[in-house]
Image: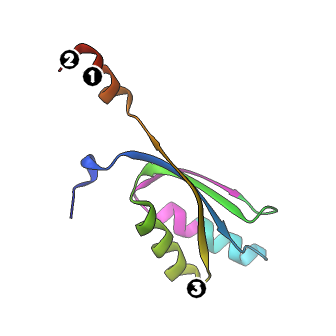
Amino acid sequence: MSGRASLKLCCMVLRLNIDCYGCFRKLRRTLLNMKEIETHLIEKQQCKVSVCGRLRPSDVAIKIRKKMNRRVEILEINEVEDEQTEQNQITGQ
């Protein structure tokens, strides 16, 4: 399994049924305990969750599904280029 440093910075949007405050709290606690997630945004009304960090999207979706015992649907995945990687490409290092 590859190390954490080799994973690219990713932002992804998930659809997850959040129908009560207890589900919201459980999801928030799950996201906060995942070390690979740097930032997250939970949109309760739209049943969407946005997460960013050095992560493997499928792993995050599986972890959330196991903890929440609910269906998780990946809507969108965006890989973000690191500023340091861009600087190295510009300078030729």
Residue 37 — which label? none
The disc at residue 89 is 1
Q: Amino acid at mark 3?
A: Asn
Instruction: Indicate the quadrant containing the C terminus: top left, top right, bottom left or bottom right.
Output: top left
67 or 32, which is in the foreground?
67
Q: Residue at x 27, y 22 (%)?
A: 89
33 inside magenta stretch:
yes
At 72% from the left and 75% from the top, the residue drawn is 17
Horizontal side of 2 relative to 66 (left or right) equals left
Nearest the eye: 10 or 75: 75
- The alpha-carbon separation of the residues under discs 2 and 1 comes to 5 Å
Which amino acid is tagged 2?
Gly
- Quote the CA–CA distance across marks 3 and 1: 43 Å
Give the labeled residue for mark 3: 69
Q: Is residue 84 left or right of residue 11?
A: left
Residue 47: % across, % down: 74, 66
Looking at the image, residue 91 sits to the left or right of residue 78; the answer is left
Q: What residue is disc 2 on?
A: 92
Amino acid, disc 1: Gln
Quadrant of the drawing holding the N terminus:
bottom left
Q: Is residue 71 above or below residue 4?
A: below
Helix, strand or loop at disc 2? loop
Q: Residue at x 41, y 68 (%)?
A: 59
Span colored in magenta:
29-42
Give the foreground label among 2 and 3.
2
Number of residues whose C-alpha sits closer than 10 Å to that of mark 2, classed few (under 14), some (14–19) or many (20 or more): few
Is mark 2 in CB contact (under 8 Å) with mark 1? yes
Q: Is residue 5 magenta?
A: no
